[in-house]
Image (tube, grey):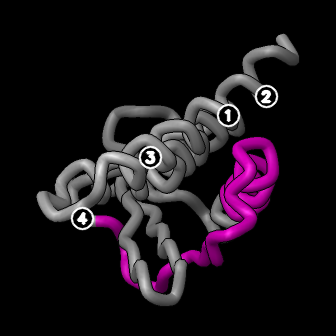
Amino acid sequence: MKNTPSAEQALFFDQCMARWQQVLHLGDWRIERGQKPAKQAMASVEFNEGARLAIYRLGDFGAEQITEKSLDDTALHESLHILLHDLIDTAQDRSAEPEKLEAAEHRVINVLERVLSRS
């Protein structure tokens, strides 16, 4: 039997994604929920780099109890994939100039500095 979020829980997840988008300074991404479920995962994210669009999907939480905390933790996890996307994409591009990779790395560092220095 599948353990998927209810419509109400999915709306809460959307709110969590919006909050993490702000906290992680991901305003240059359009982040939207997709209609199809994530396959073999609690959630997933896919990218359309040209449109700066990240589409997240909710899936089966398996044995994990669906709570506000588990939803928020999962939203953070997916948001971190978005934060790291440009760095990973640039690092995998063999033709990328070193300055481009350094800029992508510093974008992540700058966000983490702002977030972690608040604690």
28 in relation to 24, above or below? below
* Residue at image mark 3: 84
How much space separates mark 4 and mark 2, taking CA atoms? 33 Å
**Left or right of 87 on screen, residue 103:** right
Where does the image place residue 2, in percent across and percent down from the top left? 33, 57
Label 4's element?
loop
Residue 28 colored in magenta in the image:
yes
Q: Badge 3: how crowded within 10 Å, few (<14), some, or many (20+)?
A: some
Mark 4 lies on residue: 39
Which residue corresponds to mark 2? 114
Crowding around mark 4 (Cα neighbors within 10 Å: few <14, some 14 to 19, many 20+) is: few
Q: Quadrant of residue 1?
A: bottom left
Please report the residue visible at 68 percent of the width from the left and 36 percent of the height from the top.
111
Determine whether label 3 and label 4 are within 8 Å by CB. no
Q: Which residues are magenta?
A: 12-38
- For the residues marked 1 and 4, what is the alpha-carbon distance in whole angstroms? 33 Å
Mark 3 vs mark 2, CA separation in Å: 16 Å
Asked if the residue at tag 3 contacts the one at tag 1, i.e. Cβ–Cβ closer than 8 Å, the answer is: no
